[in-house]
Image (cartoon, rainbow, N blue to C red):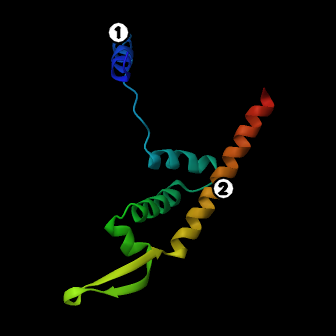
Protein backbone atom coordinates (compact mmCIF):
# COMPACT_ATOMS: atom_id res chain seq x y z
CA UNK A 1 0.00 0.00 0.00
CA UNK A 2 1.05 3.57 -0.56
CA UNK A 3 1.39 6.06 2.27
CA UNK A 4 -1.88 7.72 1.24
CA UNK A 5 -3.67 4.36 1.29
CA UNK A 6 -2.28 3.53 4.73
CA UNK A 7 -3.36 6.94 6.08
CA UNK A 8 -6.85 6.41 4.61
CA UNK A 9 -7.06 2.97 6.23
CA UNK A 10 -5.99 4.35 9.61
CA UNK A 11 -8.42 7.27 9.26
CA UNK A 12 -11.20 4.76 8.46
CA UNK A 13 -10.44 2.75 11.59
CA UNK A 14 -10.32 5.95 13.69
CA UNK A 15 -13.64 7.10 12.24
CA UNK A 16 -15.20 3.69 12.98
CA UNK A 17 -14.00 4.01 16.58
CA UNK A 18 -15.27 7.63 16.70
CA UNK A 19 -11.80 8.99 17.50
CA UNK A 20 -11.26 12.70 16.93
CA UNK A 21 -8.58 13.64 14.39
CA UNK A 22 -5.22 14.46 15.93
CA UNK A 23 -3.68 17.83 15.30
CA UNK A 24 0.00 18.56 15.06
CA UNK A 25 1.10 21.02 17.74
CA UNK A 26 2.76 24.15 16.41
CA UNK A 27 6.24 25.11 17.62
CA UNK A 28 4.94 28.21 19.39
CA UNK A 29 2.36 26.16 21.33
CA UNK A 30 5.01 23.62 22.33
CA UNK A 31 7.22 26.44 23.64
CA UNK A 32 4.35 28.03 25.59
CA UNK A 33 3.64 24.69 27.25
CA UNK A 34 7.27 23.76 27.92
CA UNK A 35 8.50 27.12 29.24
CA UNK A 36 6.76 27.00 32.66
CA UNK A 37 7.97 23.42 33.20
CA UNK A 38 11.52 24.76 32.79
CA UNK A 39 10.81 27.63 35.20
CA UNK A 40 10.49 30.26 32.44
CA UNK A 41 7.77 32.76 31.60
CA UNK A 42 5.82 31.42 28.63
CA UNK A 43 5.02 34.85 27.17
CA UNK A 44 8.67 35.94 27.21
CA UNK A 45 9.87 32.70 25.61
CA UNK A 46 7.10 32.87 23.00
CA UNK A 47 7.88 36.49 22.13
CA UNK A 48 11.60 35.83 21.78
CA UNK A 49 10.92 32.78 19.61
CA UNK A 50 8.49 34.62 17.34
CA UNK A 51 10.91 37.49 16.78
CA UNK A 52 13.84 35.18 15.98
CA UNK A 53 11.69 32.88 13.83
CA UNK A 54 10.27 35.81 11.89
CA UNK A 55 13.75 37.23 11.39
CA UNK A 56 15.06 33.84 10.21
CA UNK A 57 12.19 33.45 7.75
CA UNK A 58 12.54 36.93 6.26
CA UNK A 59 9.40 38.44 7.77
CA UNK A 60 9.30 42.22 7.68
CA UNK A 61 8.14 43.13 11.21
CA UNK A 62 10.93 41.38 13.18
CA UNK A 63 13.50 43.04 10.97
CA UNK A 64 12.27 46.36 12.32
CA UNK A 65 12.03 45.21 15.94
CA UNK A 66 14.83 42.71 16.40
CA UNK A 67 17.68 43.68 14.15
CA UNK A 68 20.74 45.86 13.86
CA UNK A 69 21.84 47.24 10.50
CA UNK A 70 25.36 46.22 9.53
CA UNK A 71 25.71 47.82 6.12
CA UNK A 72 23.84 49.89 3.55
CA UNK A 73 24.56 49.06 -0.07
CA UNK A 74 23.64 51.78 -2.57
CA UNK A 75 21.66 50.64 -5.58
CA UNK A 76 20.05 52.22 -8.60
CA UNK A 77 17.76 55.24 -8.31
CA UNK A 78 18.89 56.06 -4.77
CA UNK A 79 17.56 52.78 -3.32
CA UNK A 80 19.72 51.14 -0.67
CA UNK A 81 19.80 47.52 0.47
CA UNK A 82 20.35 47.05 4.20
CA UNK A 83 22.32 44.15 5.66
CA UNK A 84 20.70 43.23 8.98
CA UNK A 85 21.65 40.85 11.80
CA UNK A 86 19.53 39.88 14.77
CA UNK A 87 20.07 42.30 17.63
CA UNK A 88 22.20 40.81 20.41
CA UNK A 89 19.70 42.14 22.97
CA UNK A 90 17.06 39.94 21.27
CA UNK A 91 19.32 36.96 20.62
CA UNK A 92 20.87 36.61 24.08
CA UNK A 93 17.60 35.93 25.97
CA UNK A 94 16.49 33.41 23.35
CA UNK A 95 19.83 31.58 23.60
CA UNK A 96 19.47 31.49 27.40
CA UNK A 97 15.87 30.20 27.15
CA UNK A 98 17.07 27.44 24.80
CA UNK A 99 19.90 26.50 27.14
CA UNK A 100 17.58 26.29 30.17
CA UNK A 101 14.93 24.31 28.32
CA UNK A 102 17.48 21.87 26.89
CA UNK A 103 19.00 21.39 30.35
CA UNK A 104 15.53 20.69 31.77
CA UNK A 105 14.84 18.22 28.96
CA UNK A 106 18.12 16.43 29.64
CA UNK A 107 17.27 16.22 33.36
CA UNK A 108 13.83 14.82 32.51
CA UNK A 109 15.21 12.12 30.22
CA UNK A 110 17.93 11.22 32.72
CA UNK A 111 15.34 10.84 35.50
CA UNK A 112 13.20 8.61 33.27
CA UNK A 113 16.19 6.47 32.37
CA UNK A 114 17.08 6.03 36.05
CA UNK A 115 13.51 5.00 36.89
CA UNK A 116 13.64 1.98 34.57
Describe the element under mark 1 as helix, strand or loop.
Answer: helix
- The residue that mark 1 highlights is 16
Compared with 1, 42 (above or below) is: below
Of 73 and 105, which appears nearest the observer?
A: 73
Q: Is residue 73 left or right of residue 27?
A: left
| In-image side of 42 versus 66 (left or right) | right
Specify few, some or many for label 2: CA neighbours under 10 Å numbering under 14, 14-19, or 20 or more. some
Seen at 39% across and 16% down, the residue is 10
Label 2, on which residue? Answer: 100
Q: Quadrant of the N terminus?
A: top left
In the picture, measured across the screen, residue 13 lies left or right of residue 36, that is left
Q: In the displayed structure, would residue 31 be above or below residue 67?
A: above
Q: Give me the residue at 48% from left, 56% from top.
A: 46
Secondary structure, mark 2, is: helix
Find the distance from the CA under tag 1 to the CA under tag 2.
43 Å
Mark 1 or mark 2: whose residue is earlier in sequence? 1
The disc label shown at residue 89, or none: none
Furthest residue toward right? 114
Residue 108's x, y, as percent? 70, 40
What residue is at 38 percent from the left and 23 percent from the top?
Answer: 3
Amino acid sequence: MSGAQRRAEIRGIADHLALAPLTTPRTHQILLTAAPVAGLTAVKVGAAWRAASGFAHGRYWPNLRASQPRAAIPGADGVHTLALVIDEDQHRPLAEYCRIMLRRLQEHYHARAQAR
